Amino acid sequence: MRDIDLFQQALGLQSPWHVTGCTFEQRRLELRIDFDKGARFSCPECAADGCPVHDSETKTWRHLDFFQHEAHLTARVPRVRCPEHGVHQAKLPWARAQSGFTLLFEALVMALAKQMPVNAIAGLVGEHDTRLWRIVHHYVEQARARQDLSAVRRLGVDETSFRRGQDYVTVFADLDRRAAIFVTPGRDAGTYAQFVEDLRQHGGEPGQIAEVCQDLSEAFLSGALAHLPDAEITFDRYHVKAQLTRAVDLVRRAERAQHGELLKRSRYLWLRNPNDLTDRQRDHLDELLRHPLKTARAYRWMLKFDHVYELPADEAEHYLRAWCRGAKRSRLRPIIDFARMVEEYWLGIIRWFESRITNGLLEGLNSLVQAAKRRARGYRSTRNYIAMIYLTVGKLPIAITHTK
């Protein structure tokens, strides 16, 4: 079998396409492809058969490596003349329009992008990362365009930053499908307006959202009330607890000036779940609790608050009201402030006992989001970060096709 016949079969080319030659120089394999004289093609717009060739242009595409050597396809690309749609480039069996890569090469890049940083892929395949990001953005945007959001009922909303303390994006997740469905820059009320617009573009309506779980952000609350007026709002219990642990830590920090040596290296003992402490850490904490520390009192108020989530709904509201009354008499300013915050956001906090939804899904996906952050790191682009979140936790049906 001739080498060109072997490559013809390997590429899966059929008439009127055929391999006309190959060269191998300086660790680079180049395959030349052409079409038969007088060949006709279908219109790429309406699929009408028998369109004559108007003219052609020679182009080159990067293909999968041939062993350890780069492989490239070079072909004469016809433009066909359709009576209805005029002149357009014919569809090619090995590449989509306006791409410098074959479909198989792009499929490899998309598979690797789910597992490793794009800059690492660039080094592996010997291409500039900006060219690979164009592939990622094309297929992510193509998959999102096909997304159907008409069945979304329960929504989780959270924020995450691309860089430490800046460049925030807001993630909207379908809590039933366990997938990110919309990601947008910012963390203000306007992100909800953008979500609703996107929801409508994908077959949904704001009235279909029955439940929203979010943090205690005033911006998120105003956004939800303005743009999802029919949704019941649950304040995520983990974000509520985070406010309480912050209050306990504020008490510890204020007391450190007076009991610095005693409280030295004890911060995480007060903030971690007691069940997660080692035996040695638990012994240390028990010793600290024997001292008349304000931090110890704040810690006990925190443990009492945690108990509310173990109660049935008919008991929880009464217990939480009693807890707030007692906490406001604790003479511990951060604990008092937290109790008042609970009263201010009462309906959203107590709603958990009916909805039982949390952003635990988003927290659970956080490791994947952080992996997305690592894969997008170094490119100074929030757009890249968003694309990686979609690719990693969006459960998008990526299809490698000829579509532009």
Image (cartoon, rainbow, N blue to C red):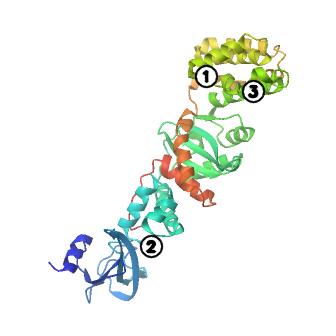
Q: CA distance from mark 2 to mark 1?
A: 52 Å
Q: Which of the image's four quarters has the C terminus?
A: bottom left
User: Residue drawn at (33%, 72%), measured in percent from left and top?
Assistant: 94
The residue beneath circle 3 is: 249
Q: CA distance from mark 3 to mark 2?
A: 54 Å
Classify mark 2: helix, strand or loop: loop
Label number found at residue 273: 1
Q: Position of residue 381 (x, y in %)?
A: 62, 60
Give the farthest residue toward the front: 261
Instruction: Give yes or no for contact between labels 1 and 3 (Cβ–Cβ under 8 Å).
Output: no
Instruction: Give yes or no for contact between labels 2 and 1 (Cβ–Cβ under 8 Å).
Output: no
Q: Position of residue 302 (x, y in %)?
A: 70, 19
Q: Amino acid at mark 1?
A: Asn
Q: Earlier in the sequence, mark 2 or mark 1?
A: 2
The residue beneath circle 2 is: 99
Classify mark 1: helix, strand or loop: loop
Q: CA distance from mark 1 to mark 3?
A: 14 Å
Disc 3 crowd rating (10 Å Cα; few below 14, some 14-19, many 20+) is many
Q: Residue 19 or 340: which is nearer the viewer?
A: 19
* Image side of residue 61 versus residue 159, left or right: left
Q: Which of the image's four quarters has the N terminus?
A: bottom left
Q: Is residue 42 visible?
A: yes
Q: Is residue 199 visible?
A: no
Q: Position of residue 267 (x, y in %)?
A: 71, 27
Whether 306 is drawn above or below 32: the answer is: above
Q: Position of residue 8 (x, y in %)?
A: 23, 76
